[in-house]
Amino acid sequence: MYGTPDYKVFQFDELHNHPLEKRSDLKKTRQMSYSEKEYIVRASTSKIGPTMAHKLRASLRGGYEFVKAKVVDYKNLRRDINRVIGYKDAQMIVKTMNDRQAYYPNYSFEFNCQDDVLDCMFWADEMEKAYYANLVMLSRLMRLSEQTSKYRMVFVPFTTINHHKKSVTVGSGLLSNESIESYSWLLKEFLKTHGKEPTLVLTDQDAAIKQPVETVKWGLLMKEFNLEDTRWFKDMFTIRDSWIPGYFNDIPMCGLMKTTSRSESMNSFFNTYSENRNLLLSFMLNYDTAIQKQRNTQGDLDKASKKASYKMQTPQEIELQSSKMVGKFTLCNTTVKLILKMNLRLK
């Protein structure tokens, strides 16, 4: 009625010109259970988006009619989660890493801020430290590569080669920019965490990486022997390209083969589990999944190596002992050659 909030019905027609909405299509009946929400979040850690997650859910349940929630509901959940995290993303990732450090005594985490904004961070857990301590002297190799993450941050995994000739991660970092200062900070935190520097460092051709690696390693050498103020050593560092290579003739270079393909392989491996538009917290969940996969593969190779039989190349006992130490699959050719030389000398 005009001028009032009331209505007066003059005629009621029970017929409809459109069908009533199905009960299964009502938003109330499409509400997801906690387990289904957990499934969507866990699927995202393996780079499975809402659409694919819904498709897999329907396949596992035996058809789409057995999945009450629609694809749009899956997408809305991901949107709502990202909205809740929002601007608190950096604070949440720092808190998560600090909690890990408090819960796991041998977990290392360091971060640096510029004007109250997260600038760079580095982390390594107990297993990664053990890999570095045990493998750095076997492979004498550490790789440093990069790829882009959310907020245009650069993901920097530190990688070495294990006794199966597979790449394993021994620490990781995130940088807000690729400046020399950022890489210098990251390398110093890496060395502080592991306690010793690698014998050899390989990087790509990025000058922002190359200069900090050279400066930090040389600076450690000068500090160790108290030579910071010696001019002769500073001059030698300037012409290092002409004399340093001669001191690496005795280092086994088997791990340096196909370095570009190894770098691309690691980047591809992490890209399988993560995507550029991820939030930092989501990126860390993806990273954890990737590391779990890497270590599971490592465990499978260790089990297979223990069950396999190694074909002896020489009758020497040292070869048998070496095969038990470094793995039956990957006894270094240098060891075999050394044994053969020793055998010839004895004869």
Image (tube, rainbow, N blue to C red):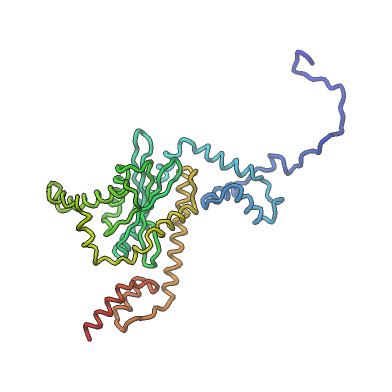
* Residue at the image point whose x is 35% and y is 59% from the top: 160
Q: Quadrant of residue 19?
A: top right
Q: Is residue 309 left or right of residue 11?
A: left
Give x and y (percent) for residue 135.
33, 63
Q: Quadrant of residue 159?
A: bottom left
As drawn, the residue found furthest toward the top would be 3
Image quadrant holding the C terminus, namely: bottom left
Q: Is residue 252 left or right of residue 278?
A: left
* Residue at the image point whose x is 42% and y is 56% from the top: 264
The front one of 241 and 160 is: 241
Give x and y (percent) for residue 162.
37, 64
**Is residue 331 at least partly visible in the picture?**
yes
Give x and y (percent) for residue 190.
31, 51
The front one of 346 and 243 is: 243
Q: Is residue 288 left or right of residue 21?
A: left
* Residue at the image point whose x is 15% and y is 47% from the top: 228
As drawn, the residue found furthest toward the front would be 242
> How many marks overall?
0
Picture layout, residue 182 above or below residue 46:
above
**Is residue 126 at least partly visible in the picture?**
no
Give x and y (percent) for residue 57.
63, 53
Picture layout, residue 46 above or below residue 299:
above
Image quadrant holding the N terminus, namely: top right
The front one of 290 and 216 is: 216
* Residue at the image point whose x is 60% and y is 40% from the top: 76
Picture layout, residue 16 above or below residue 302:
above
